[in-house]
């Protein structure tokens, strides 16, 4: 029994999570219990837990993970200010007259919200409350309607900026460095979040194309499932469409453009996105609109000008022209600051910022508590010999590197039925990723395959998070059975997406190689 403590530990983790006890406490509790068992039976050196303090410090000083609360805040502001709701209603009016048009609108809105918010829960709930009743009134099959809403909401995990990609980039970078150390390389390379954002862009759009193709084909083959909607308000004007699309598109350009263009790190771009969402919230609420718009223009001009003609004010040999330019930059920054304060006051007076901050704190606390608990779990698991067992098992699977990757993908897919993507990312992947990289798999390509697989975990019954989000927001006539059956075809489309990236690795590797 002593030699199988690591296996029993993993089984106990799944049982504890399925019991309904809070996830972070389940992970940490299992780790503490098995650390004691291992020490009592002489199977583990308990002093290994002394490294936990270093892991905690490494987490709180990790510059990459700071981007998570900023991106979450950006998405929460867009949701609470109803910018996302306006986009959804406008797109539904634009496409509703087509057969399957409401489904197309939901997928396109899901894509835009994914690239500007990255929050699955908020997107699924918003579309479940707004789009799903509209689809049902139009005569959509409840299974089809719920499947489209669930799946479109999960795009926030694969289309950057994404919480999953940030966590995955950190995990895969550490695994890549560990693999290089084991190969005897001491001048190691690291992977950046920007590389994973670039790598996920094309595969994410491939998934969107698969969803749209499926909806269009089903609309033709089974028109009774997705009839055209009765547009009482008529089609929106071009001005209405542009005013609804402009906010998320501007945020996408500001955030992804600055990262992929090399102008900012993901953390800096996340702060740009949060400020941009705050300014858009201020405009949406209708107070100090002129001041906020002037501030947005001033900040945009400042960003472009400072990149083209930077000024180092701390130097003592500045020319008169540089001093004047520096004064102009300071003036633009002050205009921007005044606009930010005005947007902040507007958001506070309408209680929008309160709700957004609460949502951000809740989600951030959940993610970081899980990562901390997973650090404790992995220490104990390694101490019990689990890492060596996993590496030996993967290296000796039939089929070599391909067989090891195939089995890993199947295990991650099955675990997605029971565990959250954060738990799988920070507990399972650090154990298998170094070995898979040592077997010859490209770490970025491997990361994107795993990202699509983990995105699927939001859709797989019985514990897919998107299913729960929609169950809470859906009308009474939509049953849990409708939701489960509705997502089944989209799980198959996810598998096709994985196969596309598997057989055409350039879908994931070309863009990061060209840009970085």
Image (cartoon, rainbow, N blue to C red):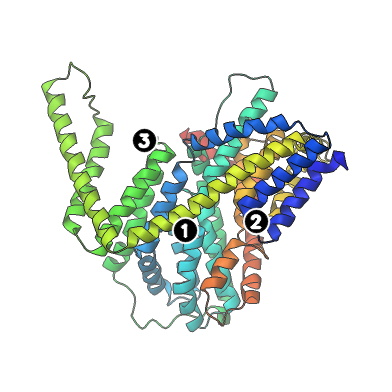
Disc 2 marks which residue?
Answer: 496
The answer, for residue 202, to whether it is visible in the render is no
* Left or right relative to 229: residue 42: right
Residue closer to the observer: 236 or 123: 123
Q: Which mark is residue 76?
A: none
- Secondary structure state at the residue bearing disc 2: helix
- Secondary structure state at the residue bearing disc 3: loop
Circle 3 crowding by C-alpha within 10 Å: few under 14, some 14–19, many from 20 = some
The quarter of the displayed image where residue 221 is located: bottom right
Is residue 391 positioned above or below 122 on the image? above
Q: Are marks 1 and 2 in contact (CB under 8 Å)?
A: no
Q: Quadrant of the N terminus?
A: top right
Q: Are marks 2 and 3 in contact (CB under 8 Å)?
A: no
Is residue 38 positioned above or below 411 on the image? above
Disc 3 marks which residue?
Answer: 263
> Could you give the CA–CA distance between mark 1 and mark 2, rounded to whole angstroms?
18 Å
């Amino acid at each position: 029994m002593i030699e199988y403590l690591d296996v029993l530990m993993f089984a106990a983790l799944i049982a504890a999570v399925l019991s309904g006890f809070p996830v972070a406490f389940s992970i940490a509790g299992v780790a503490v219990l098995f650390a004691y068992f291992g020490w009592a039976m002489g199977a583990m050196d308990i002093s290994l837990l002394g490294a936990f303090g270093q892991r905690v410090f490494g987490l709180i000083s990790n510059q990459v993970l700071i981007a998570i609360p900023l991106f979450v805040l950006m998405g929460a502001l867009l949701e609470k200010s109803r910018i996302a709701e306006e986009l959804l209603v406008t797109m539904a009016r634009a496409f509703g007259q087509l057969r399957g048009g409401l489904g197309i609108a939901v997928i396109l809105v899901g894509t835009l919200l994914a690239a500007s918010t990255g929050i699955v829960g908020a997107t699924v709930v918003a579309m479940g409350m707004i789009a799903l009743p509209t689809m049902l009134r139009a005569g959509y099959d409840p299974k089809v309607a719920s499947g489209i809403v669930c799946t479109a909401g999960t795009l926030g995990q694969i289309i950057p900026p994404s919480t999953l990609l940030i966590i995955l980039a950190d995990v895969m970078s550490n695994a890549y460095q560990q693999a290089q150390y084991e190969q005897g390389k001491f001048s190691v390379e690291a992977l950046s979040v920007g590389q994973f954002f670039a790598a996920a862009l094309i595969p994410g759009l491939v998934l969107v194309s698969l969803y749209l193709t499926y909806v269009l084909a089903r609309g033709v083959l089974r028109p009774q499932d997705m009839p055209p909607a009765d547009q009482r308000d008529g089609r929106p004007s071009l001005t209405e469409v542009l005013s609804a699309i402009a906010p998320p598109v501007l945020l996408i350009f500001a955030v992804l453009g600055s990262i992929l263009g090399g102008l900012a790190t993901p953390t800096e771009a996340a702060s740009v996105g949060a400020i941009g969402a705050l300014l858009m919230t201020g405009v949406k609420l209708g107070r100090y609109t002129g001041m906020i718009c002037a501030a947005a223009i001033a900040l945009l001009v400042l960003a472009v000008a400072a990149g083209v003609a930077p000024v180092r004010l701390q130097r003592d040999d500045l020319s008169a022209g540089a001093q004047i330019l520096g004064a102009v930059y300071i003036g633009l920054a002050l205009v921007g600051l005044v606009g930010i304060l005005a947007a902040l006051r507007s958001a506070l007076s309408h209680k929008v910022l309160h709700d957004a901050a609460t949502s951000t704190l809740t989600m951030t606390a959940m993610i970081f508590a899980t990562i901390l608990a997973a650090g404790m779990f992995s220490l104990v698991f390694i101490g019990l010999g689990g890492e060596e067992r996993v590496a030996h098992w993967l290296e000796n699977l039939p089929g070599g590197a391909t067989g090891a990757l195939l089995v890993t993908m199947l295990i991650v897919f099955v675990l997605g039925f029971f565990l959250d993507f954060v738990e799988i990312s920070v507990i399972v992947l650090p154990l298998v990723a170094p070995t898979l990289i040592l077997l010859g798999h490209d770490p970025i390509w491997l990361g994107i395959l795993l990202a699509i697989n983990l995105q699927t975990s939001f859709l797989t019954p019985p514990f897919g998070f998107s299913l729960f989000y929609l169950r809470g927001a859906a009308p009474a006539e939509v049953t849990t059975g409708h939701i489960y059956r509705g997502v089944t075809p989209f799980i198959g489309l996810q598998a096709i997406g994985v196969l596309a990236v598997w057989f055409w690795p350039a879908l994931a590797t070309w863009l990061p190689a060209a840009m970085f």
